[in-house]
Amino acid sequence: MEASITTNSTSPELLAIDKNQLHRRQLVNSLFLVLGMLTLFFSILVLLALIWDLASSGVPRLNKDFFTHFPSRWPEKAGILSAWVGSFCVMGVTALCTIPLGIAAGVYLEEYARKSWFSSLIELNIINLAGVPSIIFGLMALGFFVQKLDFGQSILTAGLTLGLMVLPIVIVTTREAIRTIPNAIREAAYALGASQWQTIKHHILPYSSGGILTGIIISLSRAIGETAPLITIGALTFIAFLPTPPVQEIWPFISFQWLKDPFTVMPIQMFNWISKPESEFHVNAAATGIVLLGMTLLMNAVAIFIRYRFRAKMKW
C-alpha cells in the first residue's frame, strides 16, 4: 500500500521529466533536420553555380568538330578527340583490373576469411588505402610500373594506377552490399544442400549485385576525373593521334599495342588549356569541363537508378 502511494505521488514528476526529455529530443531532431536541409541546399547551390559558370562560357563551343578534332595551337580548331578516346581506354583498363579483383576480394573477406587479427589487419589497411591521396598512388606507379616493370608512360600504366586507387572502394562497397543479405538466405540454401560457393553464386551475389554495381560506378566516376597520379606517371598534355586500333585487318586481327601507346585524358587536357594565357583556350577548357561533369553526373545517376531498381526487386 505504501509502495502504491509512493508510486502515485511520484508519477506526475516522472511524467513531467519524460515530457521534457521528449521535447528536448524533438528540438534536437528539428535542429538537425534544418541543418541537413541547409547543407543540402548549399551543396546544390554550389553545384548549380559551377555548372552555370561552365555552361555560360563553354556551351557555345560544344559542337561536332570539338569532339572530332585533335588539340591544336589555334583554339578555334582545337578539339578533345584524343582526350576522350584516351579517357575511355584508360577507364576500360581500370574497370578490367578493378572489378573482378575487387569483387573477389570482397567476397573472400566477407564469406570465407576467418575472423582473426590478420583479417582485421587486412580490413584496416583496406579502409586506410581508400583515404590515401591520389598522388601517392602516382608515385608508387612511377617507381613500380614505369621503372621496375618497364611499362612506360602508357595506357596500361594509367589504367593499373587508377585501378589500384579505386580498388579499396570496390572492396568496401562489395562487403557492405553482401552484409545486407539476411543470414536466413544462407541458412535456407545450406538446409537444401547447397555448398558455400553455390549459395554465394546463386543467392548472395545476385541479391547484392545492386549495391556492388553502385560502388563500381561511383569508384569509376571518381577515377575518370583524376589528374595528379596520371601527371606523375608522365601523361602527355598534347597528343594529336589516337592509340593503335585494337582490331586489325591481318592475323591475328586483335592487337594489344594500344596498351603500350602514350595517352592523354580530359582532365589533363583541361589543365593544359587553362594554363595558357589566351582566353579562347579557357573557353575550350570550360567546354571540356562540361563534358567531364556530364559524364560524372551520368555515371552517378546510373548508379542511383541501379540501386533503386535492385532494391525494388528484393523481397525477403
Image (cartoon, rainbow, N blue to C red):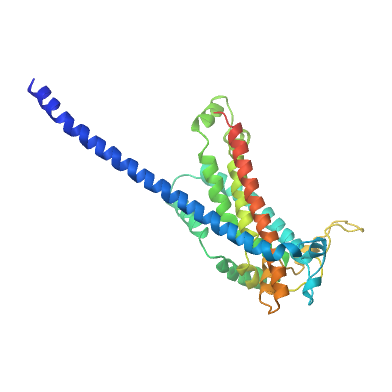
Residue 263, position as x, y percentages in the image: 74, 68
83, above or below 124, in the image = below
For the view shown, which residue lies furthest in the bottom direction? 277
Observer-nearest of 124 and 90? 90
Q: Is residue 55 left or right of residue 208?
A: right
Give the residue displayed 57% in from the left and 35% down from the top: 196
For the view shown, which residue lies furthest in the right direction? 250
For the view shown, which residue lies furthest in the top direction? 1
Observer-nearest of 64 and 118? 64
Residue 266 in view, yes or no: no
242, above or below 98, in the image = below
Which quadrant of the rendered structure holds the N terminus?
top left
Residue 21 in view, yes or no: yes
Residue 279, position as x, y percentages in the image: 70, 75
Residue 193, quarter of the rendered image: top right
Observer-nearest of 295 and 18? 18
Q: Is residue 250 left or right of residue 219?
A: right
Residue 82, position as x, y percentages in the image: 78, 66
Observer-nearest of 149 and 80? 80
Residue 143, quarter of the rendered image: bottom right
Residue 123, position as x, y percentages in the image: 48, 52
Q: Is residue 96 left or right of residue 4?
A: right
Which quadrant of the rendered structure holds the C terminus?
top right
106, above or below 55, in the image = above
